[in-house]
Image (cartoon, grey):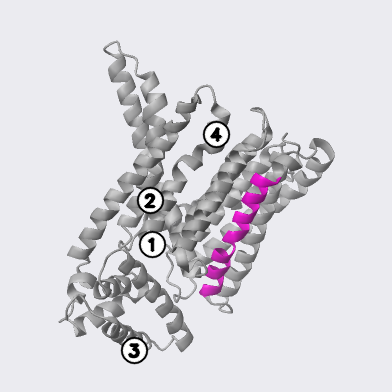
């Protein structure tokens, strides 16, 4: 069997795989359809990355996780093909993939260079990091995210219509960050600086899914990409911090002060380039079954669950209400974000057909605990914002995000409970989470575009 099979041979592979899957007595035809949808999507992704259809099919089955034993059985019975190479040993490199990887590298370097140029371009108009901090705070993500979106759109071979939408949305972001007459001490500057990155990151998500933007599977892939990208970016940021400290101290030892170079060039340019490089790293390792983010969720889910349950027990035991300061709602927003992240990345790595287990019950306890705490906080803070503090852009944005997160997690908790009780398939929970992403995008754009004039640019 050659590694350059056509559509007929690939369909025959799908048919053979499906027959093996249906040997499991607990699987119904609808379950096989769902799995085949995931498998076909993974094959399409790998073909886009440069693998031949045969190679892509073999790697995709390898990534099915719980079906790995079934895949190995299939491999033994079809040893004349590439199964032993790709499923049993995991070697998926080939000349086509190598050529595509080199092209990806050069395109990534070009996009990273574009991000660096974007960071330094405002200096040509007299805007410096030291004197114009408000401008850079509002525009920080506009320097790098368009280049990351461009790299992803190139990899996905996005159609001109998708490219036009991407350009229009980034142009809208530029307008939102710079058109409104916001004084440097305005709360709207902070609100824009926080929410514009969220809105633009979801524009990056559009570049990632490209023509498959309606696909729940592709949106979940973007969630996985986000977690992996964040981890790589943080690791590079830590490395960059060590490099900056090393340069500063070694040059200072010989009487040279590199402070201007580090603050004006190394850190901002390195951060902008790292945004693109981190995306390239995630794409370069997409054939690896074990990813970092889901592994971390397995570690931190029980820790956060124990901490939240202990807090609830302490509240009941001491009969003390939660002393909510005026900015405390942001802290509890972050709590819900962390809980949502732990839930999302465990879902992204889960076998959709595996029965509910102890970890699913642990996740339910985590989500319910976070919801209970947040309801207590909302009861305290909503009245205080209305009666004592008044409404400001920061408080209104934080309260709105809290409600949006609360709705997301509340329905996710219900779906998780029904899944554990075997009344709802896992895919329903997955679709709810991926289908909720546009709500976050809409809220972020509302805050960025509507809040400044609504609150008189305060």
Point out the frontmost of discs 1 and 3.
1
174 vs 300: above or below? above
Residue that label 3 marks: 19
Mark 1 burial class by Cα count in 10 Å: few <14, some 14-19, many 20+: some
Q: In terms of sequence position, does the residue under pointer 1 or pointer 4 come before the other?
A: 4
Q: What residue appears at the point 25 percent right and 56 percent down from the top-left corner?
A: 101
Point out the frontmost of discs 1 and 2.
1
Residue that label 1 marks: 156
Q: Is residue 244 left or right of residue 163?
A: left
Q: In terms of sequence position, does the residue under pointer 2 or pointer 3 come before the other?
A: 3
| Quadrant of the rendering where the C terminus is positioned | top right
Q: Nearer the viewer, residue 125 or 208?
A: 125
Measuring from the top left, give residue 401's x and y in whole percent.
Answer: 66, 50
Which of the 4 quarters of the picture holds residue 48? bottom left
Q: In terms of sequence position, does the residue under pointer 3 or pointer 4 come before the other?
A: 3
| Residue 268 disc label | none
Q: CA distance from mark 1 to mark 4?
A: 30 Å
Residue that label 4 marks: 137
Q: Nearer the viewer, residue 239 or 112?
A: 112
Which of the 4 quarters of the picture holds residue 84? bottom left
Q: Is residue 53 left or right of residue 81?
A: right
Mark 2 burial class by Cα count in 10 Å: few <14, some 14-19, many 20+: many
Q: What residue appears at the point 23 percent right and 63 percent down from the top-left corner?
A: 97
Residue that label 2 marks: 279
Q: Main secondary structure of the magenta part?
A: helix
Q: CA distance from mark 3 to mark 4?
A: 56 Å
Q: In terms of sequence position, does the residue under pointer 1 or pointer 2 come before the other?
A: 1
Question: What range is drawn magenta here?
Answer: 426-450
Point out the frontmost of discs 1 and 4.
1
Measuring from the top left, give residue 388's x and y in whole percent.
Answer: 82, 36
């Amino acid at each position: 069997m050659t590694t350059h099979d056509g559509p007929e041979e690939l369909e025959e592979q799908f048919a053979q795989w499906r027959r093996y899957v249906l040997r499991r007595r607990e699987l119904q035809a609808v379950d096989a359809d769902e799995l085949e949808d995931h498998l076909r999507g993974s094959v399409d992704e790998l073909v886009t990355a440069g693998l031949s259809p045969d190679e892509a099919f073999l790697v995709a089955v390898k990534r099915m996780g719980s079906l790995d034993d079934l895949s190995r059985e299939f491999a033994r019975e079809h040893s004349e093909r590439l199964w032993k190479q790709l499923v049993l040993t995991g070697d998926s490199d080939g000349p086509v993939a190598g050529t595509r990887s080199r092209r990806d590298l050069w395109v990534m370097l070009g996009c990273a260079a574009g991000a660096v140029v974007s960071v330094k371009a405002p200096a040509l108009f007299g805007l410096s990091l030291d004197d114009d901090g408000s401008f850079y705070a509002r525009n920080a993500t506009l320097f790098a995210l368009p280049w990351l979106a461009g790299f992803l759109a190139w990899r996905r071979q996005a159609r001109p219509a998708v490219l036009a939408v991407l350009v229009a949305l980034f142009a809208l972001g530029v307008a939102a960050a710079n058109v409104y007459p916001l004084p440097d001490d305005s709360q709207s500057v902070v609100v824009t600086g926080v929410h514009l990155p969220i809105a633009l990151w979801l524009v990056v998500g559009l570049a990632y899914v490209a023509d498959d933007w309606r696909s729940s599977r592709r949106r979940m892939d973007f969630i996985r990409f986000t977690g992996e990208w964040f981890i790589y970016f943080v690791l590079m940021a830590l490395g960059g911090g060590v490099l900056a400290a090393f340069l500063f101290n070694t040059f200072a030892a010989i009487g040279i002060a590199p402070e201007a170079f580090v603050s004006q060039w190394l850190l901002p340019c390195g951060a902008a380039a790292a945004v693109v490089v981190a995306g390239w790293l995630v794409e370069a390792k997409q054939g690896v079954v074990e990813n970092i983010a889901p592994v971390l969720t397995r570690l931190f889910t029980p820790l956060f669950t124990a901490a939240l349950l202990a807090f609830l027990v302490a509240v009941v035991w001491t009969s003390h209400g939660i002393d909510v300061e005026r900015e405390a709602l942001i802290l509890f927003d972050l709590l819900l974000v962390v809980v949502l992240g732990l839930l999302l990345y465990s879902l992204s790595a889960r076998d959709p057909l595996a029965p509910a287990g102890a970890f699913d019950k642990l996740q339910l306890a985590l989500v319910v605990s976070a919801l209970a705490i947040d309801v207590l906080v909302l009861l305290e803070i909503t009245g205080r914002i209305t009666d004592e503090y008044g409404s400001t852009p920061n408080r209104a944005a934080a309260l709105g995000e809290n409600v949006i997160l609360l709705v997301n997690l509340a329905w996710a908790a219900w779906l998780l409970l029904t899944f554990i009780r075997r009344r709802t398939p896992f895919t329903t929970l997955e679709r709810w989470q991926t289908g909720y992403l546009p709500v976050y995008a809409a809220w972020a754009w509302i805050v960025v575009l509507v809040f400044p004039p609504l609150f008189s640019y305060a």
